[in-house]
Amino acid sequence: MPQPIRLKDHEKDARVVRNRVLVGAVGILALTLVLFARMYYLQVIQYDYHSTLSENNRVHVQPIPPNRGLIYDRNGVIIADNRPSFSLTLTRERAGDWETVLDTVVEVLALTPEDRELFEKRLRQGRRPFEPVPIYFELSEEQIARIAVNQFRLPGVDVAAQLVRHYPLREHFAHSVGYVGRINEQELKTLDPVNYSGTHHIGKTGIERFYEDELHGEVGYEEVETNARGRVLRVLNRTDPKPGKDLQLTLDTQLQEAAEQALGGRRGAIVALEPSTGEVLAMVSQPSFDPNPFVTGISFKAYAELRDSIDRPLYNRVLRGLYPPGSTIKPVVAVAGLDAGVVTPSTRVFDPGFYQLPNYDHKYRNWNRSGDGWVDLRLAIARSNDTYFYDLAHKMGIDRLHDYMTRFGLGQRVSLDMYEETAGLMPSRDWKRGRYKQAWFPGETIILGIGQGYMQVTPLQLAQATSLVATHGKWIRPHLAKSLDNEPPVDPDPIPDIKLRDDRFWDYARQGMEEVMHGERGTARKVGNSAVYRIAGKSGTAQVVAIRQGERYNSAALAERHRDHALFVAFAPADDPKIVVAAMVENGESGSGVAAPVVKQVIDAWLLGEDGQLKPEFRPALPMAEQKSDRPHE
C-alpha cells in the first residue's frame, strides 16, 4: 500500500534557515572580532616593534671608510697617496644567483677564468650582510660603459668610485714603506669589525703595516633610505669618518735614488743612518718590485714570477738578510777588547800569516798569507789583520765576547718601527748546547773575532753597531718615522747607552777606521784618497761556501752566486759624523774594492753639494780668528 505524501513544513524550514543564518552570523562576528583583535595587537600593542622593523627595511646604516693617511719623505715628497679609482662591486643578497652573475660579468668584460676564480674567492670571504664587495678594480671607461649597457643582466652589481692606495715612486720604497692589500679571512678575525667595516685593504708589509692603526683612521656612517630592490634613494643622516694620520718618514728620496745607482743593478743592500738621531736616510734592497699590483690584487702568474725569481725581489735584504759580518765588526771587537782590559792601544801581535792555538796544529789563516809582521791595534784595523783579532778573541773568550757584541745590538732587533726585522744570531755556549747539544770549542771563539762562524747579522744591525762607534755608545734605535701627525716617534723601551772605562777607547777604534781609508797601508785607501773629507770605514767579506784548510779562494773556480759577499761600513766626516752607511753587495767578493766605492758614493750624495765640496751645513765651524766680521774696521 503506497505511503502517504508528507506535506512540506514551511515553518520548520524557516526555523532551520534562521538557525543557520544565526550560527553563520555568530561565526562571522567571531572571526571579525578575532581579526580586529589581531589588528589591534599588531598595530597598537606591537606598534613600536613593527614600526622599527619597517623602518629597518627602509633605512640602512652604511659604513663610510676613512681616507688612509698619506706618507711623505723627509722633504715632503709624496711616497704613498690615494688615487681615485672606479671599481666593480657585487652585493650577494641583491644578486640572487650570484655565481651566474659572475659568469655574466666575465662575459661582458671579456675577462679570463683566472679572474672569475679570483672574484669568487673574494665573495666567499667573511663580510657583513648587504655589504658590497669589490671584485674588480680600476675599470676603464669602456668597461664602465659595458656594465651600464648590461645592467639589467647584472642584479646586485654596481660601479663605485673610491680612493685606492697608490705608490708613485713604485719600486724605490717597496721594502721600507711596504704596501697595502686586501683583508684576508685570517686578518678579519683579529680586526675591529666596527672600525674596519667598509674597509677592504690593510697594511701588509713595511711602514704600512707597522703604523696601520694610525694610517687607517676611524670609520664613519650614514643612514640611507632604500627602495625594495636595495637602491639608495636618499641620505637621512651622516657621521663623517676621521681620516688617517699623515706620516712623514726620515727617508730622503734623492739619497735613496743615489744609493740605488751606487749598487748599479747588483744584488745587495744599503742602509744609511743619521747617527745623532737614529733616522734612516736611505734603505735599499735590490732587486726590488712595484708594490702597486698588490693593492688591487696581483695575478697568480705575476706573483709566481716574483716569488720564484732566483734574485728574490720580494726579500728585504736590509731587515731579513742574514750574513756573516766578516771584518766589518773588527772595530767593535777592538772596543770590547780595550774595555775588557785584554789589550791596550799599544799591544802588539806578530803575524806570520796565520794563528795557532797553543798545542793545536790547525792554522787559522790571515787573508794576507805572507803576514803583516808586528801589528798593534790601529794597524790591525787598518790592515784588517785576522791574526791580531784571532788572538784578541781568544783572550776575550766566548762569554765576554758574546756579552759585548750583544750590547752593540748584534743578535737582536734594533729598530723602532720596522716590522719585518729579524734578530739575527750572536752565538753563545748556551745557544750551541740548546741547538746542537754540543759544547763550545775554542776555535769557534777565534773565528767569531773576525765575524765568521755561527754569527749572522742584518745590514741594519751592522749600520747600528757602526753608529754606536761613531757616537761613542749613544743608543738611539734606527727608525723610519720622522713625525706622525706632526708628533715625533717615542721609544717605549729605550736601550741603555754603552759606557766604557775610558771614553778614548772609541777614538782608538775610529782612528784605526780612518787608517783604513786614508792610511798608507789601509785596505780601502784607493777609495779614501779621492774624498774631500775624512772617512772612518771598515771592509769585510762574508763566505758563501766554505774553503778547506790549506786551500786558497779561487774566484774563477766558483759559480757567481757562490762567491763571497762584499761588505763595507763607514761614517763621515770622521771627527763629526753626519751619516753612517752599511753596504752589502751579494757575491761582490771584495769589501774594499766593490762595497767601499758604493758606500763612498752614498756619502758623497749626502755630504757634497753640486760644486763637489761639503754642503754648508756639514762644514766645520771656523775658529774665531778665521771668522769674517760684519762689523766695520775701527
Image (cartoon, helix red, strand yellow):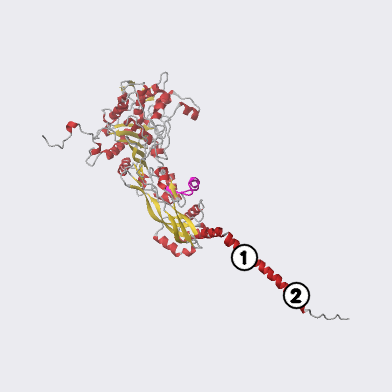
Q: What element carries label 1?
A: helix
Magenta residues span: 180-195
Whether residue 177 is visible here, answered yes or no, is: yes
User: Is any part of residue 379 visible from this angle?
Assistant: no
In the displayed structure, 217 sits above or below 379; it is: below
Q: Which residue ends up furthest to the right in the rendered image?
A: 1
| Identity of the residue drawn at 72% across and 72% down | 20
Quadrant of residue 287 within the rendered picture? top left
- Which image quadrant for residue 177? top left
Which one is nearer the viewer's eye here, 224 or 560? Answer: 224
The spot of residue 476 in percent (x, y) is: 36, 34
Quarter holding residue 265: top left
Q: Which of 428 and 197 is in front in this view?
A: 197
Amino acid type at image mark 1: Phe
| Along the line of sight, the residue nearer the viewer: 516 or 607 | 607
Q: Where is residue 323 in the image (x, y as percent from the top left)?
A: 40, 34
Q: Which residue lies furthest to the left in this view?
A: 634
x and y, in percent, of residue 115 in the image: 47, 55
Q: Residue 618 carries which label?
A: none
For this view, does 416 lie left or right of residue 186?
A: left
Q: Residues within 10 Å of mark 1 (few under 14, many from 20)?
A: few
Q: Is residue 538 left or right of residue 321?
A: left
Q: Name the residue under label 2.
A: 15
Q: Magenta span has 181? A: yes
- Tag 1 residue: 36
Percent position of residue 302, x then y: 43, 49
User: Tag 2: Cα neighbours inside 10 Å, few (<14), some, or many (≥20)?
Assistant: few
Q: Which residue is drawn at 39% across and 23% down?
A: 396
Query: Is residue 390 located in the magenta-colored stretch of the structure?
Result: no
- The answer to which of 276 and 354 lies nearer the viewer is 276
